Image: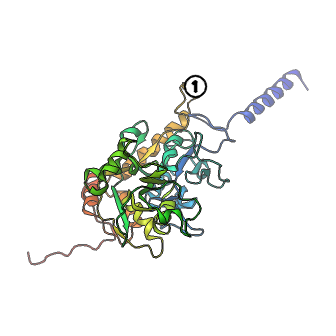
Amino acid sequence: MKASTRFTFLFCMIFLAAGLVTPLRSTAYGQEKPEQTERLAIGVRSKTQPFSYKLPPGVIDSDATRGPLSRAGYGGYMIRLCDAALAEMLVDPDISPPIKMENIKVYDIDEGAWVGEKAAVSNNLVDGQLEPAASRFLNLGRKFDILCDAATITNGRRDAIVSPPVFLTGIGYLTLRGQPALSDPCGKADATQKPVDGKPISESSPALIGLVGGTTAQTRGLRALVDAREMPEYENNLIAELRQDKSHMCQDGKVLVRTYKTHEDAAKAFCSDQSFRYYVGDLEIIRTYVSAIPGCKFDNGAITYTNDRYAIFGKAVGSYNTSPASKNVERELLVARFFAILNQKVVFNPSILDKAYDDSFPGLPQSRKLKLFYWSIRGEHLPDATDSAPEIDKSQ
């Protein structure tokens, strides 16, 4: 072989070898690494019906089967909204390289685990057991990029990307039907102690209020009940609880308010164990969980005392890093694209809010307050193509 031929052969081999170790596609985001399939992570809840929850095995949630979240086994109002945007991202020509189903990972906040993996010991980033409702914002931007849950817009959550308001609810409360008023609103703190006289502690000594910790019910909800003078006989107790005035709070290991990790736990304690008298929380959620327990008869649940606007929150994983070199620019762009698509679908008319409501609350009419809210977001409701056409008056 001639020297020139050998040089050409070696040059070609080096060029081909370089091509084998070079990523197949270079983009404006940087070079894609084939071994890293996850490009976007979504945080969901499995126990906040009817907004975000795990579906029973084999159940398909309406027609939202194109979305990664419904395919992962989740349903609910917020899930439908997120799936609508994620499904469009899967076919979006402006995303390069294209994002695929396997590039989207789902994290179950209530289980403390990635979908398809074994549940973790703890679902939080700090020592001790933190309620999922509180840990979801600690993990946003650390474990997942987008939170698809019934989360209220508050001043303390302004450090994340926030969608337009997507639902209007409020704090309300339920009472068990036929239950007498409490002479002592302070119940025993530990409802898991051994039975007393054959009865669980919770039955012999119920507390006044039960709610899920880490939610707005724990702070704004109690204050709203005081402002509305809804429980005047317990007003001094509630004020002392809000002010953390120990001289007037429950003493000797007793509590006025019992907190629970999930609504599933709270509803069971309310209906079956009767651990507290008033179940306080976002009205649609507490009614859904109590109604699911056979034989649980309740009163109230028709009035809200706050105006809480739900939204979808986002923060790209790695955005907490202070070094620009350690930030994941591709991930931040994907999060931004998600919100660009979602916002268009929410505020344009027809809006995905209407279909999400109809699918999540079948047969349940919208309240006047919710109708006005939807009108303020997307304008006058446009009739669907399936709606019957109005009759034409031929006499004119």
Residue holding disc 1: 325
Q: Residues within 10 Å of mark 1 (few under 14, many from 20)?
A: few
**Amino acid beneath label 1:** Ala
Residue at horizontal 49 percent and vertical 69 percent from the top = 272
Whole-percent x, y for residue 299 in the image: 34, 69
Quarter of the image where the C terminus is located = bottom left
Q: Locate residue 81: give its quadrant.
A: bottom left
Task: Tell which residue pokes out farthest to the left in this image.
Answer: 396
Whole-percent x, y for residue 313 in the image: 44, 44
Quarter of the image where the N terminus is located = top right
Question: Is residue 249 visible in this depiction of the protein?
Answer: yes
Residue at horizontal 39 percent and vertical 38 percent from the top = 156
Q: Locate residue 298: give its quadrant.
A: bottom left
Whole-percent x, y for residue 347 in the image: 33, 51
Local SS, label 1 = helix
Residue at horizontal 46 percent and vertical 66 percent from the top = 274
Question: Is residue 28 visible in this depiction of the protein?
Answer: no
Q: Is residue 306 left or right of residue 292?
A: left
Q: How is the image coloured?
A: rainbow
Q: Nearer the viewer, residue 79 or 153?
A: 153
Whole-percent x, y for residue 120 in the image: 65, 49
